[in-house]
Image (spheres, rainbow, N blue to C red):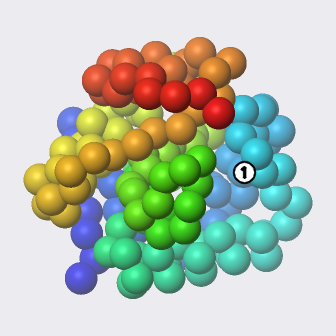
């Protein structure tokens, strides 16, 4: 069963192959990757593999990153969602992590905050998750602001 969440301005839904162009626009931009470990994509094949990986996560974990669609334009402006880590990461194992990424032209519009509020609520209320982690680069001031608005506390730096 495909899940969908609606907020005031956004629809959050599973990513589809029809989102490839929007994801490529976002993930090929070096500025979008400034504070994350992976590098910008160079081909649509790379985006297809990402969508395939996410579809596998939907099946295995029941959750993954979701498309964030602007209701007013029907444009996929980025993604937001939970990822389940079942392998150790920084001395943590079997945990859910909140993540989000948006096209640069949509930064500063509150989409990260709005979508993440809905995702976190979904995780706690629908999936009965006890704890949700979030990871950001200490230099990513904007992401830190989003996480602070959501009530996340700094637990450790690694």
Q: Nearer the viewer, residue 138 or 41?
A: 138
- At 69% from the left and 77% from the top, the residue drawn is 49
Q: Nearer the viewer, residue 66 or 69?
A: 66
Q: Nearer the viewer, residue 40 or 16?
A: 40
Report which residue position mark 1 lands on: 27
The quadrant holding residue 105 is: top right
- At 82% from the left and 57% from the top, the residue drawn is 41
The quadrant holding residue 7 is: top left
**Quadrant of the rendering where the C terminus is positioned:** top right
Left or right: where 15 falls relative to 136: left
Q: Residue 13 location, x and y as percent?
A: 35, 62
Left or right: where 74 falls relative to 120: right
Left or right: where 106 falls relative to 124: right
Residue at the extreme front of the image, as rendered: 91
In the figure, 95 relative to 73: above or below?
below
Residue at the extreme right of the image, as rendered: 42
- At 44% from the left and 23% from the top, the residue drawn is 154
Q: Residue 5 location, x and y as percent?
A: 23, 55
Q: Residue 82 location, x and y as percent?
A: 40, 55
Q: Residue 111 location, x and y as percent?
A: 41, 33
Name the secondary structure under disc 1: helix
**Quadrant of the rendering where the N terminus is positioned:** bottom left
């Amino acid at each position: 069963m495909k899940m969908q969440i609606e907020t005031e301005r956004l629809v959050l839904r599973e990513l589809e192959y029809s989102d490839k162009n929007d994801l490529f626009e976002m993930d090929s931009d070096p500025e979008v990757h400034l504070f994350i470990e992976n590098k910008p994509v160079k081909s649509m094949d790379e985006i297809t593999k990402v969508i395939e990986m996410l579809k596998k996560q939907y099946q295995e974990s029941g959750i993954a990153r979701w498309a964030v669609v602007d209701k007013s334009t029907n444009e996929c402006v980025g993604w937001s969602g939970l990822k389940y880590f079942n392998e150790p990461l920084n001395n943590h194992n079997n945990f859910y992590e909140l993540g989000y990424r948006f096209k640069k032209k949509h930064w500063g519009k509150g989409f990260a905050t709005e979508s993440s509020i809905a995702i976190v609520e979904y995780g706690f209320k629908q999936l009965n998750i006890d704890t949700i982690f979030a990871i950001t680069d200490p230099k990513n001031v904007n992401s830190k602001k989003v996480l602070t608005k959501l009530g996340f506390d700094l637990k450790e730096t690694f």
